[in-house]
Amino acid sequence: MSTAHMVADPIFSFRNHYVPEHYLKRWSGGTPRVWTYRLLVPHEHVQLWKNYSLESIGRRNHLYTRIREGNESDELERWFSTNFECPANLIIEKVVTGEPLVPDDWRTLARFVALQDVRTPARMTEIIESARDYLPAMLKEVLEGAVEDIRAAKDKDLPLPVIQDKPRAIPLPMAVRTEIEPGAETGTLRIETVAGRGYWLYAVEVLLTQTVKLLESHRWTVVRPPVGMKWLTSDNPVVKLNFYSNGSFDLGGGWGNPGSEILLPLSPEYLLYTQVGKRPRFARGDRLPEPLASQIQGLIIKNAHRYIFSDQIDPAVPNARPRVVSKEMVRMEDLGWAEFHGAQTKAEQELHD
């Protein structure tokens, strides 16, 4: 176990909102609270809709905390705020007030879509689970490169090189273990990583610095619901939709998948939309026909993870997405989050011991 001292930053940000307060505020009706429908509750007596404070909902402690040289760092939270959230908030205000948008404004909105897609607990689980499929190949690539570098150094009688993740601009978080006896011709080289918070945040950084360019290149528009309808949003607000020729669909669309439709509610009145590789079907400000708007609303509800947010009590939501009632599931999930930071920090420190 590492004995590195944890240095406390007096302004360290550890209460991480994965749904930004300034974003949810547009569903608050000018109050500090937002109507929330919980998808997992401990018993039937929990009211269907509850007015939660913007400060308390859509957040987890230490969700974005990184361990840097034994110390806790909130660098990622600050980066999110400076480079994505604050710029987008200004542009969303332009959207809701009807001001003209320039190309850079659309790119700013696209970057906010990227952030809201990758920063949520739902996406964390997805990325960590999928790591089992592609991490072995990534580690093998690093290992093979390291072996070549070591052989080249030995052939030239040079000191053994520092092993690093050269194929990627942002290095994979990993530990290198070498076991070479003095004077021996061969030894053992192991490269290890942990598929946990550290790996997820690495993937987030890659997506938001490199892959994000895909979203920036798409043609976006903003559409409104029919009169009398308001857009909902959720704790997993970016919907990535694939429609198939047989009429089926899934929510596994990709940022660069031709034909995938990507949408994000910006307020109860405005929804950001693109279809990869195509011109928008609707002009900015168009009101969608009721059947299409209802279909989109259903997708927003279906894509939610634990919370659906509204500017008012919506009696249709419980029918569209019945909540799960399980005291045990709530207990286990609460316990997992209570232990999250400690367990992830321990794993990250032990990786580098």
Image (cartoon, rainbow, N blue to C red):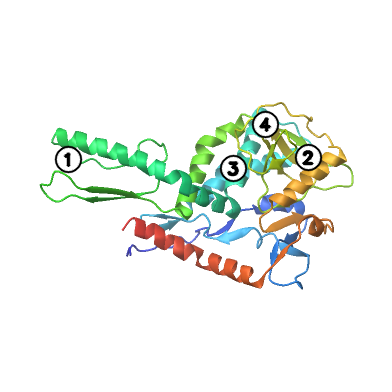
Binning the other alpha carbons within 10 Å of mark 1 as few (below 14), some (14 to 19) or many (20 upward) gives few
- Numbered circle sitting on residue 159: 1
- Give the image location of residue 269, x and y in percent: 80, 44
Q: Which residue is mark 4?
A: 259
Q: Which residue is mark 2?
A: 97
Q: Nearer the viewer, residue 278 or 259?
A: 259
Q: Check if mark 4's residue and mark 3's residue have beta carbons within 8 Å.
A: no
- Give the image location of residue 320, x and y in percent: 79, 55
Horizontal placement of 224 versus 264: left or right? right
Placement of the N terminus among the 4 image quadrants? bottom left
- Give the image location of residue 152, x and y in percent: 20, 33
Mark before the other along the chain sequence, 2 or 1: 2
- How far is disc 1 from disc 3 in space, using C-alphas? 43 Å
- How far is disc 2 from disc 1 in space, using C-alphas? 63 Å
Q: Nearer the viewer, residue 270 or 290?
A: 290
Q: Which residue is mark 3?
A: 84
Q: Nearer the viewer, residue 22 or 279?
A: 279
Q: Check if mark 2's residue and mark 3's residue have beta carbons within 8 Å.
A: no
- How far is disc 4 from disc 2 in space, using C-alphas? 30 Å
- Numbered circle sitting on residue 319: none
Vertical side of 276 occupied by 88: above or below: below
Q: How many marks?
A: 4
Mark before the other along the chain sequence, 2 or 3: 3
Mark before the other along the chain sequence, 4 or 1: 1
Mark before the other along the chain sequence, 1 or 3: 3
Instruction: Give the quadrant of residue 96.
Output: top right
Q: Nearer the viewer, mark 4 or mark 1?
A: 4
